[in-house]
Image: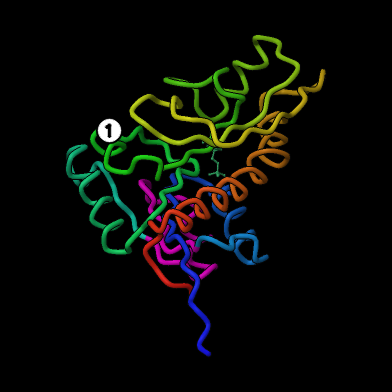
Amino acid sequence: MKQKEARVASIAVLVSGGGTNLQALIDAQKRGELHSGRIRLVISNTKDAYALERARVAGIESAMVLKKELGSTEAFEGKIRSLLDEYHIDLIVLAGFMSILSADFTAAYPKRIINIHPSLIPSFCGKGYYGIHVHEAAMARGVRITGATVHYVNEIPDGGEIIMQKAVAVRHNDTPETLQKRVMRMAEWKILPAAVEKVSSRLVAEGTASENHQ
Ligand code: GRF
């Protein structure tokens, strides 16, 4: 008897930079840890993102969407949306994507966009808290514990429902840079693939994942 084909969620990863979180997802997929999802597309909003090279090496299709060339937020988001449609994307993962998406955009994908943020939300998040600034702020405040959060994306920057968090201890001799690296290694690269699997399996269970496993 022909086995019933399992459905998987089609995933797009949106990036702007180095793409180490994208790499963590690619590696998890290679190890067979993403049972319920498959990375189909990488979209970068910058030209020189090393993440694009990581996608190429992994054999994943990619696209560059540049706001400067397109001229407006509407055109920029419109281009992203047409790519997401073209690839029948079920789940959008923001992995170091340095552009805030409009309320129109986020409303079009309720509980289908997730983001990784390098702190324990609600600490050190929202406007202005990105990249190294998050870790500078955590160290300036003197917290002994920080970490990373994966959350759904809605119209409030870093304000959507929390999906997963992992704590990381701050060391006395840390600098923002050493802390940033440890938060990535010990928290971000672990919880992002786990959260992507969790959300993908929900989409499959709800019957909203659009494609068959090949
Ligand atoms: C990560 O720290 C992530 O939490 C933040 O941006 C950084 C992206 O790094 N949103 P990378 O491009 O995944 O290496």
Return the x and y of residue 102 as percentages of the image width and height. Answer: 27, 33
Q: Residues within 10 Å of mark 1 (few under 14, many from 20)?
A: some
161 or 23: nearer the eye?
161
Residue drawn at (24%, 42%) of the image: 68
Residue drawn at (62%, 53%) of the image: 24
The residue furthest right is: 172
The residue furthest bottom is: 1
- In the picture of the structure, the residue carrying the numbered disc 1 is 102
The residue furthest front is: 1
Q: In screen coordinates, is 145 left or right of 110?
A: right
Return the x and y of residue 15 as percentages of the image width and height. Answer: 44, 47
Question: Is residue 212 found inside the magenta-colored segment of the image?
Answer: no
90 or 75: nearer the eye?
90
Q: Which quadrant of the figure has residue 190?
A: top right
Q: Label 1 sits on what residue type?
A: Ser
64 over 111 or under it: above or below: below
Q: Secondary structure at mark 1?
A: loop
Q: Which quadrant of the figure has residue 97?
A: top left
Q: In screen coordinates, is 125 left or right of 72?
A: right
Return the x and y of residue 50 as percentages of the image width and height. Answer: 50, 53
Return the x and y of residue 14 as percentages of the image width and height. Answer: 42, 48
**First to last magenta residue range:** 38-62
170 over 104 or under it: above or below: above
Residue drawn at (65%, 9%) of the image: 141
Question: Is residue 56 found inside the magenta-colored segment of the image?
Answer: yes
Which quarter holds ligand 1?
top right
